[in-house]
Image (spheres, grey):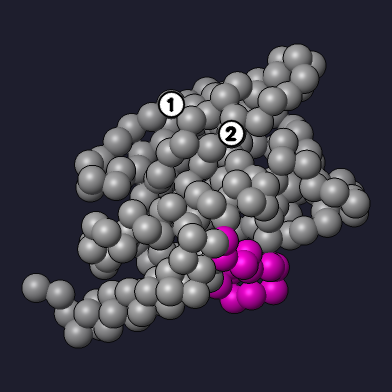
């Protein structure tokens, strides 16, 4: 049986989600920018607070918002929702050089709930990274080149998946968002650079 605090938390989340869906039905949600406390808080675990129809509608809103940005990943806190939910997808065409040097291979659409990651090799990679919630900048971030991701799918089934190269970077970036961490926290000193346009190759 849920405690009163848990009931209140679930009710609050449902209310926030319903407001977003009512306001941006078939549209895109505004992306929260750095400085908003929701980006610096550990998101609450998703434990069935939403019914299936509402959860599916939320995922579609996040997907539309990610595509419109455009980006390759979006975490729920980036649209103001403090819950452990993120979407990723990277089907952008890239040059052969980027595909090889950054191990940038296509990543099909994936919803990850309550994710955690652990390195699965000793390899690391240093590449520029951007964020839809820190517009106008990018910085070099050292990340694990290979990770194991534990997450729950939309059906509530626990999953284990291996990621390498750029997809591994994306899942690390989005999982960090759910723990109140921004890429600038992990940026290599002196590499934060202002840019005119943030290309989708690095925006998450």
Q: Nearer the viewer, mark 1 or mark 2?
A: 2
Is-magenta flag for residue 71? Answer: no
Q: Can you say whether 79 is above or below 146 in the image? A: below
In the rendered image, is residue 192 in sight? no
Q: Can you say whether 75 is above or below 118 in the image? A: below
Q: Can you say whether 19 is above or below 107 in the image? A: below
- The image position of residue 37, as x and y in percent, is 59, 76
Task: Classify mark 2: helix, strand or loop.
Answer: strand
Is-magenta flag for residue 35? Answer: yes
Residue in front for this viewpoint, 21 or 55:
21
- Gap in Å between the C-alphas at discs 1 and 2? 16 Å
Task: Pick the quarter of the image with the N terminus.
Answer: bottom left
Task: Classify mark 1: helix, strand or loop.
Answer: strand
Q: Residues within 10 Å of mark 1 (few under 14, many from 20)?
A: some
Query: Which one is earlier in the sequence, the residue at label 1 or at label 2?
Result: 2
Which residue is identified by label 1?
162
Residue in front for this viewpoint, 188 or 95:
95
**Where residue 90 is drawn, which disc sits there?**
2
In the rendered image, is residue 125 in sight? yes
Q: Which residues are magenta?
A: 28-42
| Residue lying at 74% horizontally and 48% vertically, measured from the top left | 130
Q: Can you say whether 19 is above or below 181 in the image? A: below
- The image position of residue 192, as x and y in percent, is 85, 51
Question: Main structural element of the magenta stretch: helix, strand or loop?
Answer: loop
Q: Residues within 10 Å of mark 2 (few under 14, many from 20)?
A: many
**Residue 128 quadrant:** top right
| Residue lying at 35% horizontally and 43% vertically, measured from the top left | 151
- The image position of residue 62, as x and y in percent, is 50, 55
């Amino acid at each position: 049986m849920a405690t009163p605090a848990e009931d209140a938390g679930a009710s609050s989340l449902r209310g926030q989600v319903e407001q977003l869906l009512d306001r941006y039905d078939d549209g895109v949600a505004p992306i929260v920018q750095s400085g908003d406390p929701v980006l610096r808080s550990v998101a609450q675990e998703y434990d069935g607070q939403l019914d299936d129809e509402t959860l599916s509608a939320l995922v579609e809103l996040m997907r539309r918002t990610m595509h419109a940005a455009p980006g390759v990943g979006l975490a729920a806190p980036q649209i103001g929702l403090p819950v452990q939910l993120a979407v990723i997808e990277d089907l952008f065409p890239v040059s052969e050089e980027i595909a090889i040097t950054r191990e940038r291979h296509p990543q099909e659409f994936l919803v990850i709930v309550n994710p955690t990651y652990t390195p699965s090799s000793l390899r690391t990679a240093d590449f520029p990274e951007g964020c839809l919630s820190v517009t106008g900048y990018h910085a070099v971030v050292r990340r694990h080149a290979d990770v194991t991701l534990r997450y729950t799918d939309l059906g509530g089934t626990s999953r284990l998946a291996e990621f390498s190269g750029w997809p591994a970077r994306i899942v690390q970036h989005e999982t960090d968002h759910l723990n109140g961490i921004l890429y600038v926290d992990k940026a290599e000193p002196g590499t934060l650079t202002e840019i005119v346009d943030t290309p989708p190759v690095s925006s998450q």
